[in-house]
Amino acid sequence: MNEYGIDTTESFAFLHSNELIDVYSQLASGNLYSSKDEVELLATRISSLTNEAFYELVKAIGENDAETKGLSSWNLQVVLNEISSQQIRRLCTDVCELLNARLPVNCITDNMISFWLEETGFEGARSSILDSSSPVAQHWLSRIYTYQAMSDPTSKVFELVLLDMDHYRIVLPFDVICAGEQAHPGFFTAYANKLMMFSSQDAFALQTLFPNASQLEKYHSNITKPCNIECLCRALLTAINDEHLHVVPEFMSLVFENNAIFIEQFVAECISADNADALEYASSMIWSSTNWMTLIDMAWRTIKHTPFQIASFEEPRWLRHLIPEKVVKKFPENVVWWLANNSVQNGELDQTIADVGASLPDEQKIEYLITICDLGLTIDQFKTVPLYMASAGWSWSGSEVPFLQRKIQFLEELKTHLNGIEFIENREYIDEVIRYLSSDSKEAEVREFLRPF
């Protein structure tokens, strides 16, 4: 065990000098992000290594990166970025050695790629990688294709990408993917399909298929091609299980607006994966779409038709994730309109929708109840609606009396909005409920007086 807490007697016995052991230990023992002086010192020390010693160091990092939880390779990346292009070229004269030494992908610098392509040409670099048996070959392919495509985006380059993806997972930035579509029409869909075959469990790779806001505007015509939209929909469904997946709202909205049928697949996949967070994240984009009524209807139909044997499936739970609190605050009129107009179907009250409507914040709840009454809700159906179902802010601690009084005040307010002879029975029923709550309130006062809480 050395001064950095690294056991050098067993794990790193193949490092053939104390200098290498010391450098490796520094890379593997601490975060260098805020240690500028230490980074500069290590950059100087690594710059002075021979080629052979540098390859040994890279091998130590590549083979033990998991044990250091990626810290050693991350620190090496920071240090390499401080080394001059000239020194990088001196250290990396034999890229095949770096391939065989398993240089971690995040340590492959642009200087290395630039130097290698200048020395061997694109075809030579590609052949060297394909001929190697290195487990990091796919990462090097991704980098040389990215570099080449940015400097010379010809159809031939993108044809080779698709050819090599029969055996290697090649991950390209979104800008390069769109450049491929321009140079080689049909590349976007072909590339995405091949990437999904490799990356069904790789959120990072799938994330590269989804544009950010500026890319969405820049490549709008490419993205909205029907074949590309369809492909992106499948990528979203593939990636839906990953809790770290991030898609900008503008992109999700674009997908829903260009492929309305996708909402059914999306909701079904959320339910199947029990990923309520994904549905709740998408809910704002669904409600903000120009065709929100169609999308919500399709989403609700999917929830309604979901087989009940699916684990943890409950209609009210999923409808609430489709209409979370943030959506109610942002689109209150639309939410009330949709809930009210879908509460009674074929003369029958949909209890799930009624429960969600009754759990809205007080202002929207009153609007909801007034609207369903105006739409012809019968008195018998009205009596089955939970008039004071718990909603945001409806909780208490201590005495129950103020909570019961709040329910009474809410019902008194509701009654003032139900004017006219057509609502006589509704008002009578509300008065009956108020009397019941008033009785409960008096009993609670006596109970709490005799047995303080």
Image: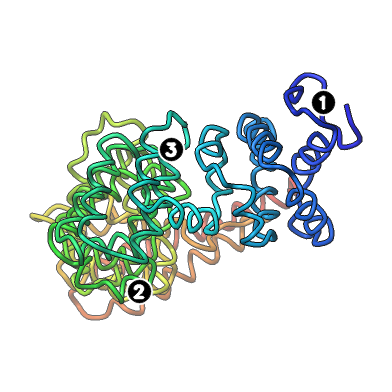
On the image, which quarter does residue 17 sit in?
top right
Viewer-nearest of labels 2 and 3?
Answer: 3
Element at label 2: helix
Q: Is residue 301 left or right of residue 328?
A: left
In the image, residue 146 sits, relative to residue 372, either above or below, namely above
| Camera-nearest residue between 198 and 388 | 198
Residue picked out by circle 1: 7
Q: Which residue is mark 3?
A: 137
Q: Which badge, 2 or 3, comes first in the chain's sequence?
A: 3
Instruction: Residue 268: give x, y in percent of width and height.
Output: 24, 44
Q: Is residue 308 above or below residue 185?
A: above
Mark found first going from the N terminus, 3 or 1: 1
402 left or right, relative to 338: right
Tell me the amino acid under the disc marked 1. Asp
Can you say which quadrant of the picture contains the N terminus?
top right
Residue at 24% from the left image edge and 50% from the top image edge: 191
The three-letter amino acid code for the residue at tag 2 is: Pro
Q: Which mark is residue 332?
A: 2
Residue 415 sits in quarter: bottom left
Q: Is residue 337 left or right of residue 43?
A: left
Q: Secondary structure at mark 3?
A: helix
Callout 3–callout 1 Cβ contact below 8 Å: no
Crowd rating for badge 3 (residues with CA inside 10 Å; few <14, some 14–19, many 20+):
many
